[in-house]
Amino acid sequence: MNELPLLDAIQALHTPLLDSVMAFLTQIGNFGAVWALFACCLFLRRSTRRLGLFMFLALAAEALVCSGILKHAFARPRPFTLVPGFELLIPQPGGSSFPSAHAASSFTALFFLWFSGHPTLRRIAPGAAVLALLISFSRLYFYVHFPTDILAGAVLGGAIGYAAAKLGRSGVSKNF
C-alpha cells in the first residue's frame, strides 16, 4: 500500500500559522514530554500519587517497547527519506518510522486516563483525546510518519495504557 499520496495531500494544508501550531504540538509530543509532565503532576498530589506512578510506568513501558524494540526490529525508513529533495520544517527525527512513538505515548496516556477509574481523569480524557489526535496528526503533517505508523503507535499505546490502568486499579497495586 502506497501511503505517500495521502501524505502529499496533507501537505496542501500548510500555512505559516498552522506550521507553528503543528511544530508546537510535535515538540510537546517529543519523548512523551507532555504526558510525562502530566504523570508527574498526578504523582505530586497525594490523592493521585498511585495513578501518577502507574501512568509514568505505562509511558516507560511504551518507550521501551516502541522505541527500544519495535523501531529497531522494523527499521522502516521515514517517508521524507523516500522523496528526493524533501525539506523538513522541523529538525530531522532520529530512529526509524514504525511505529510512531508520538502516537504511542499519546494513546498510552489517553487510555490510561480513560480507564483509570478516577472520575476527574475520566472527565479530562476527551481533551486528552483531542491532544493525542493532534500530536499524532502533526507527524503526518511534517511527513515524518506514514499513516500506518500512527495507527500502530495508537494501537500499541492504547493496549499499554489500558493494561496499566487496569493494573493500577487492581488489588495488586495497593502495595505501591
Image (tube, grey):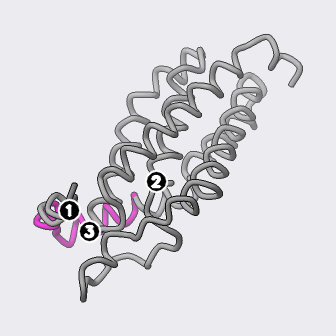
Q: How far apart are marks 3 and 2 (CA)?
A: 23 Å
Q: Which of marks 3 and 2 is nearer the N terminus?
A: 3
Q: Quadrant of residue 144?
A: bottom left
Q: Does the magenta stretch include residue 152?
A: no
Q: Nearer the viewer, mark 3 or mark 2?
A: 2
Residue 108 position, x and y percent, is 54, 38
Q: Earlier in the sequence, mark 2 or mark 1?
A: 1
Residue at horizontal 82%, vertical 16%? Answer: 172
Q: How many residues crowd around disc 3 within 10 Å: few (fewer than 14), some, or many (20 or more)?
A: some
Q: Which amino acid does label 1 sit on?
A: Leu
Question: Are circles 3 and 2 on residues that touch, CB within 8 Å?
Answer: no
Magenta range is 10-25
Residue at horizontal 56%, vertical 59%? Answer: 73
Q: Nearer the viewer, residue 106 or 80?
A: 80
SS class of the residue under badge 1? helix
Q: Is residue 91 above or below residue 34?
A: below
Question: Are circles 1 and 3 on residues that touch, CB within 8 Å?
Answer: no
Q: How many residues crowd around disc 1 within 10 Å: few (fewer than 14), some, or many (20 or more)?
A: many
In the rendered image, the quadrant that contains the N terminus is bottom left
SS class of the residue under badge 2? loop
**What residue is pinned by disc 2?**
99
Q: What residue type is labelled 2?
A: Pro
Q: How far apart are marks 1 and 3 (CA)?
A: 15 Å
**What residue is pinned by disc 1?**
7
Question: Are circles 2 and 1 on residues that touch, CB within 8 Å?
Answer: no
Q: Which of 37 and 57 is in front in this view?
A: 57
**What residue is pinned by disc 3?**
19
